[in-house]
Image (cartoon, rainbow, N blue to C red):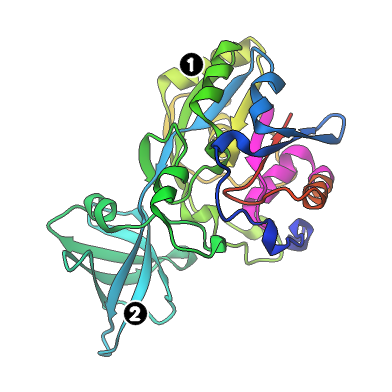
Amino acid sequence: MHISEFDYELPPELIAREPARPRDASRMMIVDRQAGSFSDSLFKNLPNVLRSDDVLVINDTRVIRARIYADLARSTGTRRQIEVLFTNPVTATIWEVMCKPGKRVRAGDRITFADGAATGTFGEVKDHGLRLLEIESNLSVAELLEQFGHIPLPPYLQRSDTHCDSVEYQTIFADRPGAVAAPTAGLHFTPEILGQLTERGIEVVKITLHVGVGTFLPVRVDDPRKHSLKPELFQISNDAAQRLYTARQAKRRIVAVGTTSTRTLEYVVEKHGDFTADSGHADIFVLPGHRFRAIEGLLTNFHLPRSTLLMLVSAFASHELILRAYSHALAQRYRFYSYGDCMLIL
């Protein structure tokens, strides 16, 4: 296996820099794994494409305002402005962060942000180039980010976040704060679509995976099997686990909304042998050759070349079929990435 096997050329104009409006106006490619075929459709057709007894699993994580701009005071005496992405809490006042630019940040350097309401001191470098940052403020980190932070849009959008992004970069079922990136397959849903799913008898089950920085860190090794994913915090409630277990016993099809839901379900079933209530940190890295034990269907967006997300989708639908489907998407001018169109693999 080589990283180049998951590469493709994407014209910049096919990157969706704004969301579909309304949300459910996006296109949807339907991929048939068994037939090895695909067809073009619209996301609005989802309730009629699914079976009436299907179970749809959604991720109810909520994106936090994780990006702040700060004044950096180096121990050498120089100063500049930097961007800091709060990725993961270690304690109430110490977070793992990613800085931009970050190569010249050193332990002991300090930042001031939130209009002077907070300061921070950098510590050691951790895995994946993350740094420890200890915050000093009368406000909690959650309060600081909510009041002074920015929505952490993916860098390939090449623009600053706006007020619209604070709404449109959240799913309509976002409920549990903690993600630093949206579970983007869920962005297409509207209350009307959820209502139609319910009317058809399609059960919707909520689980939580707080999407972490590992989702968008690049794979820097030639052999993807040598790459390690940073663990992400998840939770499957007793109710969700029981509903999924009951559905499995009744041989109903379980369709995951997004790679985040997929990773969570596959991690738990691999760990316990079946759907079980659990919480903690999931670190499963799904590559071609993985035996899927939790899901029979997947709704997902079109992902970056060489990304772990593209590798997961290739594992589910076969590498050859996904490459053909992506070539078709390029030819048909589908919109790619977080705010783009979607693919339903059944």
Give the numbered dot on residue 70. none
Secondary structure beneath disc 1? helix
Circle 1/circle 2 CB separation < 8 Å: no
Give the numbered dot on residue 242. 1
Furthest residue toward left = 138
306 is within the stretch colored magenta: yes
Residue type at mark 2 is Arg
Q: Residue at x 73, y 60 (%)?
A: 10
- Position above or below: 343 against 330: above
**Observer able to see residue 211:** yes
- Position above or below: 45 against 8: above
> What x and y, as percent, mark residue 247?
59, 14
Give the numbered dot on residue 106. 2
Q: Which residues are magenta?
A: 296-322
> What x and y, as percent, mark residue 264?
53, 36
Does residue 56 appear to the left or right of 27 in the view shown?
A: left
